[in-house]
């Protein structure tokens, strides 16, 4: 036993409406979920309040992004203070879609991580290489650089979950093999041991994301350094329950 509590996040992305969120909440609320797993649902910001009001208290809610300051002239942004005011305790930062669709830099993501943690939110911090980077053999270089920008902005690692999401596996139906996932998770843990501390390396949860399904989750969950999942499309379906219970 690692002592690391299994963590399953669902990233709803730009999906859902009040009707479907209520239906999903009812499904999750009535399901038998493994009590030894932390469960967090990442709702669109406009539905954070609604999702929090509909889900049972044992299921946490996350925002999918936030800004690096508490308030100000930043049209269209939301802050950790606002997220917390909705009873929401987590935020996803640095998702590959924020990096590659919206052009967020490592530096900006680092600043967001720092502010979210200072504000008392838990952070699901995402890293991962693109297909051309994996094929060029620079996966480690890329994810270590991304992790450094995050690590440099973390004081309290107990509030951080690292999500490794190979970009080539997100929404493509391609999943990293359990061995590929384990290899990167192991290397990340070694990097944290060398650059942060041995204690953080052994306690921080490193979760996997990238086309996780009810069919692939059990074998991935059996890998010793895979501490959970960040789930995309499947988190909107009843199979999310099977993924939450992958360790049961």
Image (cartoon, grey):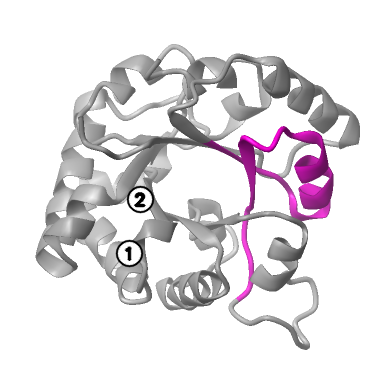
Q: Quadrant of residue 207?
A: top left
Distance (Cα) linking label 2 and label 1: 8 Å
Q: Position of residue 103 (x, y in %)?
A: 54, 67
Q: Relative to 143, is 55 on the left or the right?
A: right
* Labels 2 and 1 touching (C-beta < 8 A): yes
147 drawn magenta: no
Provide the secondary structure element on which disc 1 rests: helix
Q: Tell which residue pokes out farthest to the bottom in this image.
A: 73
Q: Report the residue that reaches farthest toward the right.
A: 19
Query: Where 168 falls versus 157 (above or below)?
Result: above
What residue sits right under mark 1 in the picture? 146
Q: Quadrant of the C terminus?
A: top left
Q: Tally the marks.
A: 2
| Residue for point 25% across, 25% down | 178
Assess disc 2: are there few (<14), some (14-19) or many (≥20) residues with their C-alpha within 10 Å of its C-alpha: many
Rendered location of residue 2, percent (x, y): 21, 36
Examine the rendered structure and indicate whether residue 32 appears above or below residue 2: above
Dot 2: element: loop
Q: Is residue 37 left or right of residue 222?
A: right
Q: Where are the magenta residues, as a range? A: 39-67
Q: Residue beneath label 2, please?
A: 128
* Percent coordinates x, y for residue 90 in the rendering: 58, 54
Quadrant where the N terminus lies?
top left
Q: What number is the disc on residue 133?
A: none
Between 152 and 59, the one lying in front of the other is: 59
Give yes or no for residue 43 being in the magenta stretch.
Answer: yes
> Toward which corner of the image does residue 226 lie, by quadrant?
top left
Q: Earlier in the sequence, mark 2 or mark 1?
A: 2
Residue 220 in view here? yes
Residue at 68% over, 81% down: 70
């Amino acid at each position: 036993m690692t002592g690391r509590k299994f963590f399953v996040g669902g990233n709803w992305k730009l999906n859902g409406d009040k009707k479907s969120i209520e239906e999903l909440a009812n499904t999750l609320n009535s399901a038998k979920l493994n009590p030894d797993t932390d469960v967090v649902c990442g709702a669109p910001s406009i539905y954070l309040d609604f999702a929090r009001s509909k889900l049972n208290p044992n299921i946490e809610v996350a925002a999918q992004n936030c800004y690096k300051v508490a308030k100000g002239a930043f049209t269209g942004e939301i802050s950790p203070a606002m997220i917390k005011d909705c009873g929401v305790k987590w935020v996803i930062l640095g998702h590959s879609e924020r990096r590659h669709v919206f052009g967020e830099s490592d530096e900006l993501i680092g600043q967001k991580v720092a502010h979210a943690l200072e504000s008392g939110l838990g952070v699901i911090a995402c890293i991962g290489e693109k297909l051309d980077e994996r094929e060029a053999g620079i996966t480690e270089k890329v994810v270590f650089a991304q992790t450094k920008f995050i690590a440099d902005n973390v004081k309290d690692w107990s509030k951080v979950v690292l999500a490794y999401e190979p970009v080539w596996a997100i929404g493509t139906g391609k999943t990293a093999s359990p061995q590929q996932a384990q290899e990167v998770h192991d290397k990340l843990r070694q990097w944290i041991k060398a650059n942060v501390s041995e204690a953080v390396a052994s306690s921080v949860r490193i979760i996997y994301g990238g086309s996780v399904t009810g069919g692939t989750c059990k074998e991935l969950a059996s890998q010793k350094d895979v501490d959970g999942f960040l789930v995309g499309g499947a988190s909107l379906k009843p199979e999310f329950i099977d993924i939450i219970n992958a360790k049961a």
